Image (tube, grey):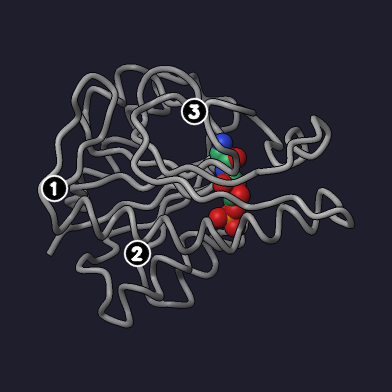
């Protein structure tokens, strides 16, 4: 069974959506460990409650390269095959990315390449887009940039606020993250230039 290492910084709802799919038998994987750079992340507490290995690895005051070495070591210790970023609010160093080639996924709450970085739903709302959404992508050395696995579109309604829009995007995030993982773990795929070719 493929071993996932979930890395998060906060609430952890994407992690829980993936954990639910695994529990229901619809995603053939297991969560080997959940790691947070924030000791007080609710996602870490949720992992403990579910009886999963949960590791607090505080990033505060630690040099990025050094932190990423510790993170890679903790993931290796738990025999992780795939790294699943689920609301991990730090940029990974090139050294870390080279440790897990084509095995690091991220979810971002916009239709990339639009609205990279923080608070993407708010950025999209303020820009006035009519279609927002979310993206599951491989992680490369640039922020919110790697090859795209799946995207979902979310229409912006007239009475939306940034909060209501973010809520509907989140529902789609929960759906497509497990779906993308399921595809990559069960079907043939390859990356051609930067296109993820499935099947
Ligand atoms: C999600 O909306 C995720 O797409 C976003 O943070 C939130 C985490 O929520 N990630 C990023 O913005 C990464 N650039 P969660 O902790 O409930 O999964």
Q: CA distance from mark 2 to mark 3?
A: 27 Å
Q: Is mark 3 within 8 Å of ligand 1?
A: yes
Is 49 on the left or on the right of 196, as rendered? right
Q: Which residue is mark 3?
A: 144
The one nearer the camera, 93 or 162, is: 162
Residue drawn at 13 percent across, 48 percent down: 199
Q: Which residue is mark 1?
A: 199
Q: Which residue is mark 2?
A: 53
Q: Are marks 2 and 3 in contact (CB under 8 Å)?
A: no
Asked which secondary structure carries label 2, the reply is loop
Is 82 on the left or on the right of 46, as rendered? left
Q: Are marks 3 and 1 in contact (CB under 8 Å)?
A: no
Q: Whole-percent x and y of residue 41?
A: 60, 55
Is 105 on the left or on the right of 160, as rendered? left
Q: Is residue 36 above or below residue 124?
A: below
Q: Of the residues tagged 2 and 3, which is closer to the observer?
A: 3
Q: Is residue 51 above or below residue 185?
A: below
Answer with the quarter of the image where residue 127 lies: top right
Badge 3 crowding class, 10 Å Cα cut-off, few under 14, some 14 to 19, many 20 or more, is many
Residue drawn at 34 percent across, 29 percent down: 147
Asked which secondary structure carries label 3, the reply is loop
Q: Of the residues tagged 2 and 1, which is closer to the observer?
A: 1
Residue 39 visible within the image = no
Compare marks 3 and 1 and give the one earlier in the sequence: 3
Q: Whole-percent x and y of residue 89?
A: 57, 37
Q: Is residue 42 above or below residue 86?
A: below
Q: CA distance from mark 2 to mark 1?
A: 33 Å
Q: Are marks 2 and 1 in contact (CB under 8 Å)?
A: no
């Amino acid at each position: 069974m493929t071993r996932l290492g979930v890395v998060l910084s906060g609430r952890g709802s994407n992690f829980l959506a993936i954990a639910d799919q695994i529990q229901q038998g619809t995603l053939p994987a297991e969560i080997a460990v959940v790691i947070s750079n924030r000791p007080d992340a609710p996602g870490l507490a949720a992992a403990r409650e579910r009886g999963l290995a949960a590791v607090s690895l505080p990033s505060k005051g630690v040099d990025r390269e050094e932190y990423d070495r510790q993170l890679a070591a903790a993931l290796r210790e738990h025999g992780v095959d795939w790294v699943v970023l689920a609301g991990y609010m730090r940029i990974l160093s090139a050294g870390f990315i080279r440790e897990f080639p084509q095995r690091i996924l991220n979810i971002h709450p916009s239709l990339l390449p639009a609205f990279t970085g923080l608070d993407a739903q708010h950025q999209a709302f303020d820009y006035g887009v009519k279609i927002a959404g979310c993206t599951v992508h491989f992680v490369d050395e640039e922020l919110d940039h790697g090859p795209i696995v799946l995207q979902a579109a979310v229409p912006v309604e007239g009475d939306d606020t940034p909060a209501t829009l973010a809520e509907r995007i989140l529902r789609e995030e929960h759906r497509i993250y497990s779906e993308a993982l399921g595809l990559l773990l069960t079907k043939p795929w390859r990356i051609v230039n930067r296109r993820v070719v499935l099947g």
